[in-house]
Image (cartoon, rainbow, N blue to C red):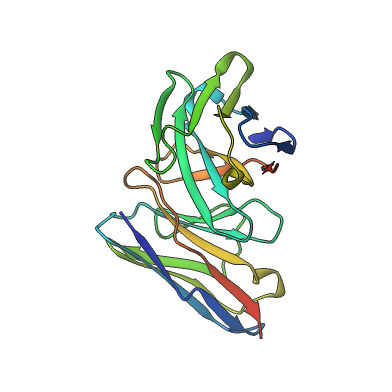
């Protein structure tokens, strides 16, 4: 069974860096796009970007480009979302999600990582 | 591409039939998915390719549409269906979501 397991909750102060992870198992990790989705407290879902682990081809939502970096390491079947300098407005739940064989399907979601940024 | 989902909030009862609409600002063929999210949980895929039911999703869920107008219908609402529903377009990047529709028990 395909599964995405995300790293644990983080509490950071503004200006700190952070990298959260999403480990895939039960499927061919390198051949499925992985997207990241933000959900701020009490708000809706926001698509941040997507990566193809096999060649690291990455597409960003312009709203997030330059503020986060998406990467992947196929040797350990893990995707990452990184911030160089966190802001209080980055406080949110972050989900990774796998695209299925069809480009119309985002079918497997991670359990989510809560990031809290507070001084 | 912008997605406009309506209504934003729906107060309804067990056994009711409800319809949620999602309108795209430009044609997206059938590159639309629907998700259900319950509090404190990750979203769950219900429908992809505008009308294809994901494996394991109850048949009371159905969806239709093509181009710019899409509808998710839930027949005979069950207590476990009270949640927030989102549409998402996968036609072009960024793969944005609608703003969500919250179903609440009347």
Q: In this view, does B105 lie above or below A3?
A: below
| Closer-to-camera residue (B52/A39) | A39
Question: Where residue A1 sits: x, y (%)?
Answer: 66, 35
Q: Is residue A1 visible in the rendered structure shown here? A: no
Question: Where residue B4 sits: x, y (%)?
Answer: 38, 66
Question: Where residue A113 sits: x, y (%)?
Answer: 68, 40
Q: In this view, does B65 lie to the left or right of B8?
A: left
The quadrant holding residue A18 is: top right
Quadrant location of the N terminus of chain B?
bottom left
Q: Residue at x 66, y 35 (%)?
A: A3
The quadrant holding residue A52 is: top left
Question: Where residue A104 sits: x, y (%)?
Answer: 41, 46
Q: In this view, does A54 lie above or below B74?
A: above
Q: Is residue A9 above or below residue A29?
A: below
Quadrant location of the C terminus of chain B?
bottom right
**Residue located farthest toward the left when viewing the structure as drawn:** B26
Q: Residue at x 47, y 41 (%)?
A: A48
Q: Residue at x 41, y 51 (%)?
A: B96
The quadrant holding residue A19 is: top right
| Closer-to-camera residue (B99/B58) | B99
Count all numbered tags in the image, as a single digit.
Answer: 0
Q: Is residue A57 visible in the rendered structure shown here? A: yes
């Amino acid at each position: 069974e395909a599964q995405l397991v995300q790293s644990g909750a983080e509490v950071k102060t503004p200006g700190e860096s952070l990298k959260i992870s999403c480990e895939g198992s039960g499927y061919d990790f390198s051949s499925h796009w992985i997207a990241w989705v933000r959900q701020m407290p009490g708000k809706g879902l926001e698509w941040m970007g997507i990566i193809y682990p096999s060649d690291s081809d990455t597409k960003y939502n312009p709203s997030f480009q330059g503020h986060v970096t998406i990467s992947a390491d196929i040797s350990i079947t893990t995707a990452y979302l990184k911030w160089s300098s966190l802001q209080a407005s980055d406080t949110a739940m972050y989900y990774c999600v796998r695209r299925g064989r069809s480009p119309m399907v985002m079918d497997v979601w991670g359990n989510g990582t809560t990031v809290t940024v507070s001084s | 591409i912008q997605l406009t989902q309506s209504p934003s909030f729906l107060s309804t009862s067990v056994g009711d039939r409800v319809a949620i609409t999602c309108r795209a600002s430009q044609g997206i063929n059938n590159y639309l998915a629907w998700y259900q999210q319950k509090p404190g949980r990750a979203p769950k895929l219900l429908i992809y390719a505008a009308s294809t039911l994901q494996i394991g999703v109850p048949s009371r869920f159905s969806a239709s549409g093509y181009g710019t107008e899409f509808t998710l219908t839930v027949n005979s609402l069950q207590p476990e269906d009270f949640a927030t529903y989102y549409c998402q377009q996968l036609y072009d990047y960024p793969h944005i979501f609608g703003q969500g529709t919250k179903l609440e028990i009347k």
